[in-house]
């Protein structure tokens, strides 16, 4: 963000660099998922926080959509003991 606002380069060049850095970040982030997906389940550790040992379930389910849903059980608020 600071680079986008303060760099001496023209705005188009800054925007292109931002897109390029986003693409590199996405490629590096997806590499783990793809490596885990092509590795047989018997040859890799269990993908935590999933019910089916699928890395896509972890990325899109546990770390994706379920972060925005409020389906976690909550305990009832405790009351102080009566005097």
Image (cartoon, rainbow, N blue to C red):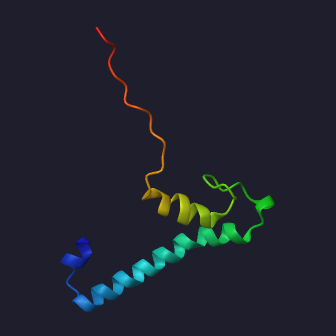
Q: Residue at x 59, y 72 (%)?
A: 31
Residue 76: x, y in percent? 41, 32
Query: Does residue 39 appear left or right of residue 66 in this picture?
Result: right
Observer-nearest residue: 15 or 66? 66
Observer-nearest residue: 52 or 5? 52
Give the position of the N terminus as an image quadrant. bottom left
Residue 13: x, y in percent? 29, 90
Give the position of the C terminus as an image quadrant. top left
Q: Residue at x 60, y 52 (%)?
A: 49
Residue 35: x, y in percent? 67, 70
Q: Residue at x 23, y 88 (%)?
A: 11
Residue 4: x, y in percent? 24, 78
Which quarter of the picture shows residue 39? bottom right
Return the residue found at the far top: 83
Which quarter of the picture shows residue 19? bottom left
Return the residue found at the far right: 42
Query: Does residue 46 appear left or right of residue 43 in this picture?
Result: left
Return the residue found at the far front: 82
- Judge whether residue 55 can be spotted in this image: yes
């Amino acid at each position: 963000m600071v680079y986008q606002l303060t760099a001496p380069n023209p705005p188009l060049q800054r925007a292109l660099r931002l897109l390029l850095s986003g693409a590199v970040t996405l490629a590096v982030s997806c590499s783990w998922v793809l490596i885990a997906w092509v590795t047989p389940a018997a040859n890799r550790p269990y993908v935590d926080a999933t019910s089916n040992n699928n890395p896509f379930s972890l990325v899109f389910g546990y770390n994706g959509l379920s972060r925005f849903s409020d389906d976690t059980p909550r305990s009832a608020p405790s009351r102080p003991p009566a005097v």
